[in-house]
C-alpha cells in the first residue's frame, strides 16, 4: 500500500454518531423547531426508542397540535 493511500485511509475514517446529550422525560417542556425555523414550546408526551434513534411525541403549547419529532428538532 502506498503512503498516499495510507494517508487517505487514515484521514477518511468514519466518525461514530454522537450519543444524545439530553435525557427526555414525559412532562418536560422543551423548545422545538417544528417548521422552517419557527420555534414553539412543547410538552413531551412519550419518548419512543426505535432503530433510527429516539423520537418524541409532543403537544405544542398554545396550539391544538401533536407531533412526532426527532431529537434533532429540539432547540438547545
Image (tube, rainbow, N blue to C red):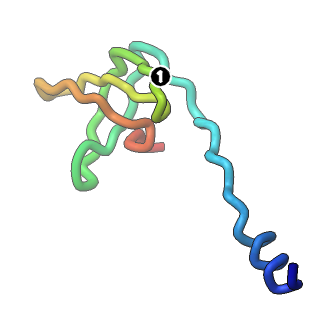
Disc 1 target residue = 49
Q: Position of residue 36 (x, y in %)?
A: 23, 55
Viewer-closest of 13 and 42: 13
Which element carries disc 1, helix, strand or loop? strand
Say which quarter of the image contains residue 56.
top left
User: Mark 1 packing: few (<14 Cα in 10 Å), some, or many (20+)?
Assistant: few
Seen in the picture, residue 45 relative to 74 is either above or below; the reply is: above
| Residue in front for this viewpoint, 37 or 17 | 17
Residue 26 vertical position relative to residue 29 in the rendered view, above or below = above
Q: Looking at the figure, which quarter contains the N terminus?
A: bottom right
- Give the farthest residue toward the left: 64
Residue 45 percent across, percent down from the top left:
33, 15
Seen at 62% across and 46% down, the residue is 17
Q: How many marks?
A: 1
In-front residue for pair 72/75: 72
Horizontal and vertical percent position of residue 66: 20, 24
Give residue 11's position: percent from left, percent from top. Answer: 76, 72
Residue at the image point whose x is 36% and y is 20% from the top: 44
Q: Residue at x 80, y 70 (%)?
A: 10
Amino acid at each position: 500500500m502506498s503512503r498516499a493511500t495510507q494517508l487517505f485511509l487514515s484521514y477518511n475514517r468514519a466518525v461514530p454518531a454522537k450519543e444524545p446529550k439530553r435525557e427526555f422525560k414525559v412532562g418536560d417542556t422543551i423548545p422545538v423547531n417544528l417548521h422552517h425555523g419557527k420555534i414553539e414550546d412543547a410538552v413531551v408526551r412519550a419518548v419512543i426508542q426505535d432503530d433510527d434513534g429516539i423520537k418524541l411525541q409532543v403537544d405544542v403549547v398554545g396550539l391544538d397540535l401533536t407531533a412526532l419529532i426527532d431529537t434533532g428538532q429540539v432547540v438547545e
